[in-house]
Image (cartoon, rainbow, N blue to C red):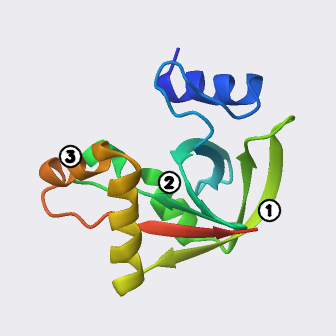
Amino acid sequence: MDFNQQIVDTFRANGGEVNEPVQFGKKLVLVHVPRKDGSLRIAPLAAIQDDDVRYIVGSAGGSPKHPAWVFGLRRVEEVDIEVPGEPVETLRVKVEEVTGDERDAMWARFKEFSSGFAGYEKTAEGRAFPIFRLIA
């Protein structure tokens, strides 16, 4: 089974808690990203939450290229996300890309959130990871 699909299935089956195949707890959201062809891709992404705002980052595991979903989010103003809860809840959110000093501050928070993010900087060949604000 595809790694992301395994995470999506576990997320939905456990009220948004994912501890296998990787320990995420309830710190993920499922983002319904529109593709150019009109279909949807569901991307399980780590999220930092501040009240009704969630932040996600296009780290692509430290790849030198942006994940495809970044381009999908840049084309739209709103998307659906699934958030942890009993049951998992689907929310319509406004999408805004975070830039400048605010982006840098959020990137620092992602590195505090998980040391894995700091490691991604070493393999990304200087790529700045895009960060998006999802506003409920």
In the rendered image, which quarter contains the C terminus? Answer: bottom right
Identify the residue position indicated by label 1 in the image. Answer: 92
Q: Which mark is residue 69?
A: 2
User: Which secondary structure lies at badge 3?
Assistant: helix
Work out whether mark 3 precedes mark 1 in sequence or the reverse, and give the earlier one: 1
Please provide percent x and percent y for residue 97: 50, 75
Q: Which mark is residue 108?
A: none
Work out whether mark 1 precedes mark 2 in sequence or the reverse, and give the earlier one: 2
Please provide percent x and percent y for residue 63: 25, 47
**Callout 1–callout 2 Cβ contact below 8 Å:** no
Identify the residue position indicated by label 3 in the image. Answer: 119
**Callout 3–callout 1 Cβ contact below 8 Å:** no
Q: Nearer the viewer, residue 25 or 93?
A: 25
Residue at 67% x, 30% y is: 11
Q: CA distance from mark 1 to mark 2?
A: 17 Å
The label nearer to you, 3 versus 2, is 3
Farthest top residue? Answer: 1
